[in-house]
Image (cartoon, helix red, strand yellow):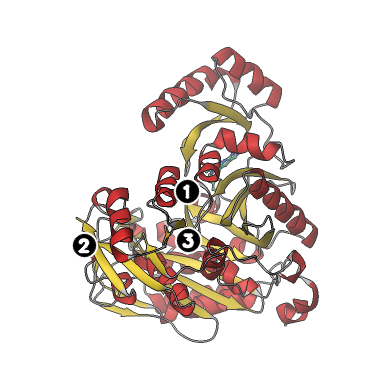
Amino acid sequence: MSRIHKLLIANRGEIAVRIARSAKEMGITTVAVYSEADARAPHVQVADEAYLIGPAPSAQSYLQIDRILAVAKESGADAIHPGYGFLSENAQFAERVKEAGLRFVGPSAEAIRVMGDKLSAKQAVEAFGVPLVPGTAYAIESVEKAIEEARRIGFPVMVKASAGGGGKGMRIVHDADGFVEAFTMAVSEAEKSFGNGAVFIEKYVQKPRHIEIQILADQHGHCVYLHERECSIQRRHQKVIEEAPSVVLTPAQRQAMGEAAVKAAQSCHYEGAGTVEFIYDASGEFYFLEMNTRLQVEHPVTECITGLDLVREQLRIAAGEPLGYEQSEIPLLGHALELRVYAEDVKNGFAPDIGALKVYRRPQGPGIRVDDGLEEGMEISIYYDPMIAKLVVHAPNRQAAIERMLRAIQDYIIIGVETTLPFGQFVLGHEAFISGDFDTHFVQDHFLPELLHEGQEAGIAAALAQFRQQQVQPVLSGSVGSISAWRRR
Ligand code: MV4
């Protein structure tokens, strides 16, 4: 066990600010790196020291391993936190950090490598008894073999690239007729995009929910799950709203999924904070999809319901400290929602909108948290992700959380760029969302730009009116032990 004294944060924006805050609370000095586009960015201002690492394009700055390691050396940092995106799931980076004699705040390069490839991930977790979607856990070599397997599994099936991710390299095949073409295309696409033509097939799960489990694992073989996040509300593989807990899981299912996630972590000797993704089908079965070996964008909803600071836990684990708590001691308190606020023009097909934040006022009050990395007057850059902020609310139960989020959206004033705030308001006021009866096709099934209300005030009023008209109480998921009274209040 050895203390971290100085932490280099190899990221930008809200997550770099988020990491710096926890480090500061722990008495750790922080080092920011920044591109020419970010010289005055909040993540530079909150850090104790900051170093320019290159021009705006991330390939020339935030992805430059050598420059980041040079800054670590020059500044005397003894650990690097990669945040999410950029180098966070780059096994080579994790390796280089260790070779330089620094702590990597995350799992081993080997764990990143195993989980970074869908087939090796499936093989690893299968051996530990984690449920997989019916299909093949090996690369299919020939079309003939593929058809044979597809017939065995039963159509519709999905052809997936082992190296794919975020929805890339996937194809649905409904019958044997379309199979040869789809399979051949999938292989050649995978070769072109990922330099790896390995594909496998799985039964296509028709109306799945995306539910993921947050885990924490220390260096001493102890691993716990911090319950689930429901991430089914997404658009083109981009999550829009996340919540914890999920409305559908019973306490028994939560435990089963949590224990499966812990096994997945153990299968690759995981260390740090990680997320195991499952698909949950209409009959209540769940299957492993993949493991994300980083801190995720949506981690705040888990922080709300457990009271844990995930970045602090990551830094404690990286310093070799034991977790210090048992599974039964992890709370599940109330309900949390996160809305990702993007600079996008919803009416124009969610096109990225750039420009200056002319007016920027955050909502405030009990149970409201805004994680952002911009200030009023700053430009939304074309170079990076168009996410402006994560608006997070926490309340005793789901209904109160929805009402709180609608109020927070109303109080959030962003002028200068179009944002997804009105879209969030649409989702929160929709009966399918309120009742909990939704899946990953929610946006496709229910959203049309014409359904957005003109003007924020009118929209909120309409959403609240619709909310209050709901006859059925929203489903409340099971709760844990003695805090259930608080949840039901
Ligand atoms: C699936 C699936 C249905 N059946 N696999 C999409 C991204 C990648 N992580 C896996 N994905 C899916 N895999 C089988 N066998 C449906 C999806 C899927 C999806 C998964 C999670 C969240 C959103 C999604 C949106 C469309 C499709």
Residue that badge 1 annotates:
237
Q: Earlier in the sequence, mark 1 or mark 2?
A: 2
Circle 3 SS class: loop
Residue that badge 3 annotates:
297
Ligand 1 contact, mark 1 (Cβ < 8 Å): yes
Q: Position of residue 157 (x, y in %)?
A: 61, 30
Q: Earlier in the sequence, mark 1 or mark 3?
A: 1
Q: Is residue 401 left or right of residue 30?
A: right
Which quadrant of the figure shows ligand 1? top right
Residue that badge 2 annotates:
37
**What amino acid does circle 2 point to?**
Ala
- Residue depicted at 44% across the width and 62% down the height: 451
Circle 2 SS class: helix
Q: Is residue 270 left or right of residue 458?
A: right
Estimate the spatial distance between the alpha carbons at disc 1 and disc 3, rounded to whole Å: 14 Å
Estimate the spatial distance between the alpha carbons at disc 2 and disc 3, rounded to whole Å: 22 Å
- Residue depicted at 37% across the width and 52% down the height: 86
Estimate the spatial distance between the alpha carbons at disc 1 and disc 2, rounded to whole Å: 27 Å
Nearer the camera: disc 1 or disc 2: 2
